[in-house]
Amino acid sequence: MRPDHGAQAGAEDVQIFRCPEQMRLDFHTLDVFTAMRFGGNPLAVVLDADELDEIQMQAIAREFNLSETVFVTAPKNPAHSAGVRIFTPMSELKFAGHPTVGTAVLLAELKAGNVETEQDSIVTLEQQIGVVRVGIRLKPGEAGFAEFDAPKPPQDAGALPPVEKLAAGLGLIANEIGFENHRARCFAAGPAFAMVPISTREAIAKARVSPPHWEAAFDEQGIVGVYLYTRQCVHNKSAFHARMFAPALGVPEDPATGSAAICLAGAMHRFDDFPDGTHKRVVEQGYEMGRPSQIVVSNVVRGGELETVRIGGQAVRVSEGRLSI
């Protein structure tokens, strides 16, 4: 599913692209958090975007109309791989997970060329939130795999409105929110998400954005999106089944959300009480949209504290082309 086109570009946006000599920029699209084309979360990556300004980047992201579009620039530090800026159809983000995974896999594959043996490498991306180091594994005939440590550990950002309000905003009933000891909370790891546990997969499947009640339930909290999760999964290897809504960003629903999965790690740590060690869980998302995704979330606990959250997943290239600007 693609976000609906919002307001059309204004006259000033049109003027931006009227120039004597056209600029031509290569781009690629990828499906992220999947090993199969036409699954996962689509991503557009525009290369060599140094001469674009913020207005142009936003207009191009609106044209691609995907959850996020990445613009790759030369790094400020020559020891790093690239600078990146991330835009939804509506606004710029300081950080997002699936653009990090997809961009890192693409840059590693473009550098490696034809992969004949297994290769491991590091891609260092300068993002608005800071420098993110991404480990890449490339294997012949397989989708590339990327894994990174969250630039910020998730923090408990407080309680959400009563479940009756949350349920109304999601088109559910109050007793469908919560399971075991999991309760709705706000968590932030840069972007803040409302983390809403749902009792069953049947309930999560019927959830929706309910405009008359959504603002009171969620928009007043200053969150990026609403992340629903349940333990009832499609696949036995998955620990959680999830959905994410972010209508304020022009993303009615997202097929796979790495930054929200970081916040889910915070909820896991709070409610599941992991002992010290590394705890790896697979989160499935996007199934209600027909775009199955798998996100690997690793919680590293030391001294009873959540020390590191690691996000991993595959990405596969789908298309490439050239923008004329």
Image (cartoon, rainbow, N blue to C red):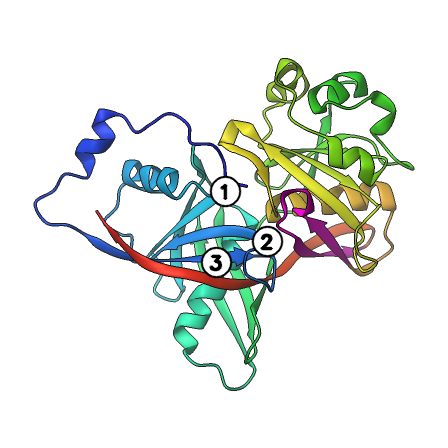
x 34%, y 65%: residue: 78
The tag earlier along the polypeptide, 1 or 3, is 3
* Residue position for label 3: 30
Q: Is residue 316 above or below residue 98?
A: below
Q: Amino acid at mark 2?
A: Gly
Residue 69 seen in the current view:
yes
Query: Where does the image place residue 190, in percent across and percent down from the top left?
Result: 57, 40
Query: Where does the image place residue 228, in percent across and percent down from the top left?
Result: 72, 36
Residue 289 is a magenta residue = yes
Q: Amino acid at mark 3?
A: Leu
Quadrant hosting residue 37: bottom right
* Residue position for label 1: 67
The tag earlier along the polypeptide, 3 or 2, is 3
* Residue position for label 2: 40
Secondary element type, mark 1 = loop
The alpha-carbon separation of the residues under discs 1 and 3 comes to 12 Å
Q: Amino acid at mark 1?
A: Ser
Q: Is residue 213 above or below residue 69?
A: above
Magenta segment boundaries in residue numbering: 281-302
The alpha-carbon separation of the residues under discs 1 and 2 comes to 11 Å
Q: Is residue 197 above or below residue 313?
A: above
Secondary element type, mark 2 = loop
